[in-house]
């Protein structure tokens, strides 16, 4: 009898468990059905609302253009085809998940980029993967939070502050050129630019942001290596649609690598900010009259106060410092590399820039670019701007809006849709630029710019949410390019892995525009500097 009761009890308990599991699975199934239904309804609604825009051929009604956006040379050529066909804009769907309008004409770009910051939102498709790294920084925040941070950070990019950074740009460039001379001394004249220049811009930024001499151009740095790895992992994640969901990504091998690199970067920034705040507090308490060092980025934002006397918290300062490092090194390195590449391809322009710099340096004991020199390099600046047009480091920016946005031609972007402002498409639009794929610096001669649309040239975006660091980037660009042309002659190099090729460098659009297999240039030394 006890045995029979035990068997019956076991059966009943098993039956109860099955019933619980059945209920759980039924509820989960219901949730999936409801979520799928809402997703499909949303997809139909956006498809209807965006029907005023032309739509390129899609793989299917449901999956749309999923897989058609490629981070390759062919992907950029596909953008050229879209611009040729649709002139100003088209709609785009990435499955039922993301609904976009792609824009590549100044008349359509302007109302979006010039919209008030209060109705402009950074979408999660492009920027969401940066949030674990950059937090609620200026780059990723919205609304009043963004406005407050913009006001507090603006003093960090004032001319009086940038003036102090020019000496750092010179020093970091000199270190890079010393490395080049070492390679040349042992017979290596074919150099890969991205490796050298990325380390140089990181070196500069660490000094400008933290007054930290990492020596990263000569030896490995855990912090610098972690930044490079984070950038690579973000690119990898963006290209894998399933990795867009955090609950999947953090369980993957790449997600675990990301967390490890992230802990290194965040620990470094946290320690710098905490030590600097403690030092400032100590100086206030002792009222020291000792000479003060020149303020770096962290110093300035630590001391910034809004109209209520409130500053940024340590966490907010860390987010902004991380953003300064992320946004400042890769974009500027890309701009420098492509400028040197374009000058290597066009010897007549390279020589004209060199003569301009040599005339500027004439009669000086030391060949160093000073703040006042930056406005005295007009042709070199034209070449830099034309390179930023032809090979813009950032290929697109995305925005969402909290209200419907009206565009020319009776087109309306519905609230919540992603607006992908194609910087590449706008810069290569033949209805805007004559022979847009040619390098022609005189486009930016002041006498030739009068008829140019205001938003035809947008390498740093535009409007209230433009790049706050663009003057910093342009200053560093002019210093590095000028010193490089003063000391070296550049010609096109050869990727040693593929050998000589008749074709041009294949572009590689990732977080910034790079080159497949690297950017190889031949470097020939000119007359040594007087101060060497």
Image: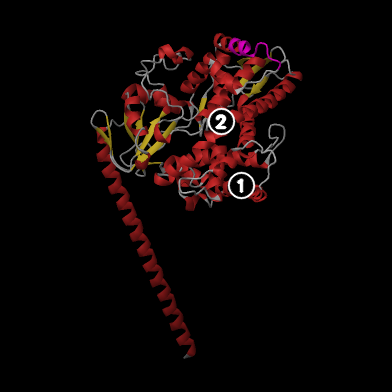
In the rendered view, does 26 fall on the left or right side of 285? left
Q: Where is residue 157 in the image (x, y as percent from the top left)?
A: 53, 34
The residue labelled by disc 2 is: 160
Q: Quadrant of residue 337?
A: top right
Q: Which residue lies furthest to the right in this view?
A: 186
CA gap between label 2 and label 1 equals 23 Å
Look at the image and say whether residue 205 sits in the magenta stretch.
Answer: no
Mark 2, other Cα within 10 Å: few <14 / some 14–19 / many ≥20:
few
Residue at point 56% right, 25% down? 475
Q: Where is residue 259 in the image (x, y as percent from the top left)?
A: 58, 49
Q: Which of 215 and 344 is in front in this view?
A: 215
Q: Which residue lies furthest to the left in this view?
A: 410
Q: Nearer the viewer, mark 2 or mark 1?
A: 2
Q: How is the image coloured?
A: secondary structure
The disc at residue 57 is: none
Can residue 240 be seen in this snapshot?
no
Q: What element carries label 1?
A: helix
Chain part drawn in magenta = 355-365
Q: Considering only order in the chain, which callout, 1 or 2, is on the residue closer to the N terminus? A: 2
């Amino acid at each position: 009898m006890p045995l029979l009761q035990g068997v019956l009890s076991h059966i009943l308990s098993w039956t109860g468990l099955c019933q619980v599991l059945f209920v759980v699975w039924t509820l989960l199934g219901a949730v999936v059905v409801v979520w799928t239904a809402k997703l499909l309804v949303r997809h139909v609604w956006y498809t209807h609302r965006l029907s005023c825009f032309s739509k390129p051929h899609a793989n299917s009604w449901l999956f749309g253009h999923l897989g058609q956006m490629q981070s390759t040379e062919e992907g950029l050529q596909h953008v050229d085809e879209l611009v040729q066909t649709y002139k100003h804009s088209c709609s785009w769907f990435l499955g039922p998940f993301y609904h976009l309008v792609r824009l590549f004409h100044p008349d359509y770009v302007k109302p979006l980029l010039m919209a008030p910051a209060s109705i402009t939102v950074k979408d999660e498709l492009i920027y969401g993967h940066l949030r674990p790294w950059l937090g609620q920084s200026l780059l990723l925040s919205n609304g009043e939070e963004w406005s407050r941070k913009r006001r507090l950070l603006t003093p960090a990019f004032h001319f009086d502050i940038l003036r102090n950074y020019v000496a750092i740009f010179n020093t970091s460039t000199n270190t890079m050129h010393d490395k080049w001379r070492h390679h040349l001394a042992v017979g290596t004249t074919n150099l890969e630019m991205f490796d050298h220049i990325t380390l140089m811009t990181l070196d500069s930024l660490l000094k400008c942001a933290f007054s930290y001499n990492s020596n990263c151009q000569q030896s490995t740095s855990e912090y610098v290596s972690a930044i490079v790895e984070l950038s690579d992992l973000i690119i990898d994640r963006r290209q894998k649609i399933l990795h867009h969901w955090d609950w999947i990504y953090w369980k993957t091998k790449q997600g675990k690598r990301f967390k490890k690199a992230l802990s290194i970067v965040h620990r470094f920034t946290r320690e710098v900010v905490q030590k600097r705040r403690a030092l400032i507090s100590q100086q206030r308490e002792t009222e020291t009259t000792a000479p003060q060092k020149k303020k770096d980025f962290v110093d300035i934002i630590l001391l910034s106060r809004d109209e209520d006397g409130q500053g940024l918290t340590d966490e907010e300062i860390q987010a902004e410092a991380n953003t300064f490092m992320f946004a400042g090194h890769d974009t500027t390195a890309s701009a420098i590399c492509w400028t040197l590449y374009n000058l290597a391809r066009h010897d007549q322009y390279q020589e004209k820039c060199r003569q301009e710099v040599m005339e500027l340096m004439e009669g000086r004991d030391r060949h160093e670019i000073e703040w006042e020199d930056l406005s005295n390099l007009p042709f070199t600046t034209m070449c830099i701007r034309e390179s930023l047009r032809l090979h813009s480091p950032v290929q697109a920016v995305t925005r969402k809006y909290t209200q419907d946005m009206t565009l020319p031609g009776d087109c309306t972007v519905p609230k919540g849709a992603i607006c992908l402002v194609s910087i590449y498409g706008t810069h290569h639009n033949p209805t805007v630029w004559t022979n847009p794929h040619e390098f022609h610096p005189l486009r930016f001669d002041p006498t030739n710019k009068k008829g140019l649309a205001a938003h035809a040239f947008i390498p740093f975006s535009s409007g209230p949410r433009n790049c706050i660091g663009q003057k910093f980037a342009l200053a560093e660009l002019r210093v590095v390019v000028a010193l490089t042309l003063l000391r070296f002659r550049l010609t096109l190099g050869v990727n040693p892995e593929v050998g000589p090729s008749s074709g041009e460098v294949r572009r590689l659009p990732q977080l910034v525009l790079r080159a497949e297999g690297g950017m190889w240039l031949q470097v020939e030394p000119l007359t040594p500097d007087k101060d060497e």
